[in-house]
Each structure stands twice: as C-alpha cells, then as structure tokens.
Amino acid sequence: MRSSLKLIVYESKSGSSVSRTYCGPPHALKPRLASNPKTTNPCIFILTSAKTFFGVLTVLWDVYLPWKFTLSIRIGALKVSNLVKIDWLTVGPFQTNVYVFKCLESQKSVIVDGGGEPQKLHAMATDGAELAEIWQTHGHIDHVAGLADLRALSDAPILMHRADLPLYEGAEAQGRVYGFPCKAPPSVDRFLEDGETLSVGAHQAKVILLPGHSPGSVAFYFEELKTILSGDVLFAGSMGRVDLPLANPRAMRESLDKLWELPDDVRVLSGHGPETTIGTERRRNPYFAPGSF
C-alpha cells in the first residue's frame, strides 16, 4: 500500500495571503537520480536540500515553539492618539492563546486569560501602560494556569463569570488529571454579568455569555473595533469541545447562534488556533451554521 507524507513547511501569518511549500515522501523521487536533470547538477541539489532542511526547521519553529503575533488597530485615519494594540502569545501544552489588549491613548491594558507565561504577559501588559484588570473567558486549567504567578506580579483584579467558579477552583485537580502542574488560582475579584460593558481606557467591550464549552464561558466584543475575543467557543473551522465536565452541547448550539448574528467583518480572536472572521466561519465552519448540529 502506498504511503503519503505532506508537510506544511511554511504558512504565512499575515491573515490575507498564505504561501505553502510541501515536501513529498522519499519514494516520490525518480528511481534513478541520473534521469532527473535537477539532481545531476550539484549546485541545484545542494540548494534543494538546503531549502528542505530550513523548511523543516520552520515547521519546528511554527508548530512546536510558542509563537507571538502583534495586531495594531488605529481608530480613525486622523486620530493618531486613538491607538489600540493587541499582543498575544500561544502558551503551554494545550497551545492556548493569551492576549494583552492595550489602549495607548490612556496607557491602560488588560490581560485576557492568564493561561501561562505570566512574566512575559506582565511585561507585555506593563510596557508603556498600566495593567488595569485580568479578564477570564472561562475557568479551564489552560486559561488560568498562570494566574497565581500573575497575582504575585500585579494586584490587578481578576474578572470571570460566576458559573465557571467550580472549574476555576478545581484547577489544581484538573492539573493532576492532565499531568499539567497548576497552582491554585487566586480568588476572583469580581463576577462578570451577561451584557455588561467593560472599559480599557477609551474603548469598551460588551460581555456576552456563551455557555456550552463551559457553563460560564464569555466573549469580549469590541464593537467599535469589529473584534471579538471568543475564548473556546468559536475557532477557525471548529468549535470548543462539549464532551468535558459541565459542558452542554445544546447550550453551545445556542451560543454559536448568538455569534452567527454578528457582522461578517468582525475579527475573531479565539482561545486556540489562528484568527478568523465571522464571515469566514459562515462559509467554512461546519459547526457554525444554525442547525448544523
């Protein structure tokens, strides 16, 4: 039986263009090197081998090492002082996206999900700004594992929906199940309410309760910026798991239906995987359309 191997060696992260290079299996080569003119030229052979080698290194860098993106949004073409910066890191064995939302005009910032790399997160949040709050999309271990160490660095209040408190308070137990060390997170300072408005300097986010993946999952919707931080509810091409303790498939269906009502051009920054848009998910996500499951 023939085997096949297809490696994505490089994929651009610009959000608008994607370039890929593929390496095929060894048996895909010509059986006799002399019959392939490209392999008879030693210079071409060396260059091709080098391209493959560095391509594989790129795979290892992109897939196995934590990566960081930076997104800058300017509000209005002439309002130079109205700047927003969103930094994010992918951390831990579950490759969780953690975010820093920064209003450069007011020099205020918030962290969204303290899932890991607390020193880096704190440094990003306090680089030219004051860390005002820590917002939690939900209470699973991969989104709270860095909170204890963050609290040692900052007394910024932690905000989360009350319905996820059992998961949050059980983070150490979750860690033992998954073999993922986790210190007990500090107490939640304030509980979020569905529909309330949070502020980061001059910018406001609406809290949207989206149960399903967990009972207290929320998203933070910056309508003026056309950006939503969706936690583990909606992913590029997929959705959050509903086979976990306290998950609810029917509630997840209703939560996705809420997000379906958002405009196509809303940017989705989720808890795992690359960014996407509501419009892209309408066209490509098999779980997103109403009634799809």
Image: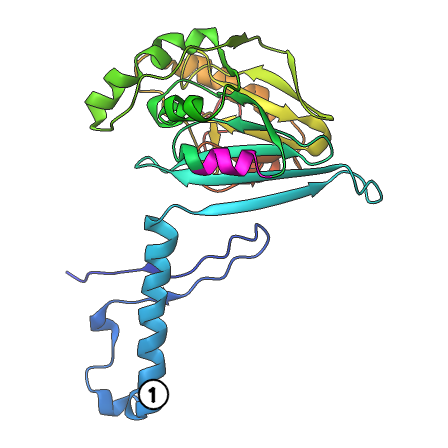
User: Label 1, on which residue?
Assistant: 38
Can see residue 37? no
Provide residue 174's location: percent of width, then percent of height.
26, 19
User: How has the structure been colored for display?
Assistant: rainbow
| Closer to us: 32 or 225 | 225
Provide residue 194's location: percent of width, then percent of height.
58, 10
Magenta segment boundaries in residue numbering: 120-127
Q: Is residue 121 magenta?
A: yes
Q: Residue at x 26, y 90 (%)?
A: 35
Q: Is residue 57 magenta?
A: no
Can see residue 17? yes
Relative to residue 31, is residue 202 drawn left or right?
Answer: right
Provide residue 233's location: percent of width, then percent of height.
47, 25
Would you identify the image quadrant in which residue 66 lies? top left
* Magenta stretch, main secondary structure class: helix
Three-letter code, disc 1? Lys
Relative to residue 148, is residue 132 drawn left or right?
Answer: right
Crowd class of label 1 (few under 14; some 14 to 19; many from 20; radius 10 Å): few
Tell me the quarter of the image containing the N terminus: bottom left
Q: Residue at x 35, y 27 (%)?
A: 142
| Closer to us: 8 or 198 | 198
Q: With respect to residue 231, does 284 lie above or below?
A: below
Q: Residue furthest left?
A: 1
